[in-house]
Amino acid sequence: MGEFADKVKAAGNKVAGNVKEAAGKATDNERLEAEGKAQQLKGTAQDVKGSVKGALGDKI
């Protein structure tokens, strides 16, 4: 998977995680809130992965 694809997936996970976290807070559902936070972290990791691929892509 390339840099762009990783960054797109990252953005999707961040948005979905943010929605889950907000829904969890609104409904007082701690599990859903935690899932949202975890999904946002996954998105952040994917974003970093994409950035690293972009920086190293031409050198590999």
Image: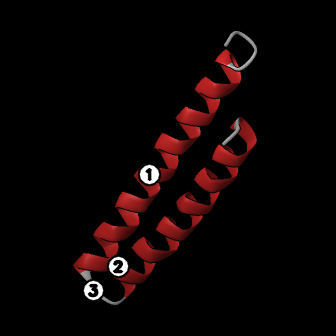
Measure the alpha-carbon separation of dots 2 and 1.
20 Å
Which residue is denoted by mark 3 in the rendering? 28
Q: Amino acid at mark 2?
A: Lys
Q: Quadrant of residue 32?
A: bottom left
Q: Amino acid at mark 1?
A: Lys
Which circle's residue, 3 or 1, is located before the other in the chain?
3
- Residue 1 position in % (x across, y down): 66, 42
When the figure is inspected, residue 39 is found, relative to residue 33, above or below; the finding is above
Which residue is denoted by mark 2 in the rendering? 25
- Looking at this rendering, what residue extends furthest in the bottom direction? 27
Q: Residue at x 27, y 84 (%)?
A: 29
Closest to the observer, 15 or 47: 47
Q: Residue at x 70, y 25 (%)?
A: 54
Q: Secondary structure at mark 2?
A: helix
Q: Secondary structure at mark 3?
A: loop
Q: How many marks?
A: 3
Q: Quadrant of residue 59?
A: top right
Q: Residue at x 54, y 61 (%)?
A: 13
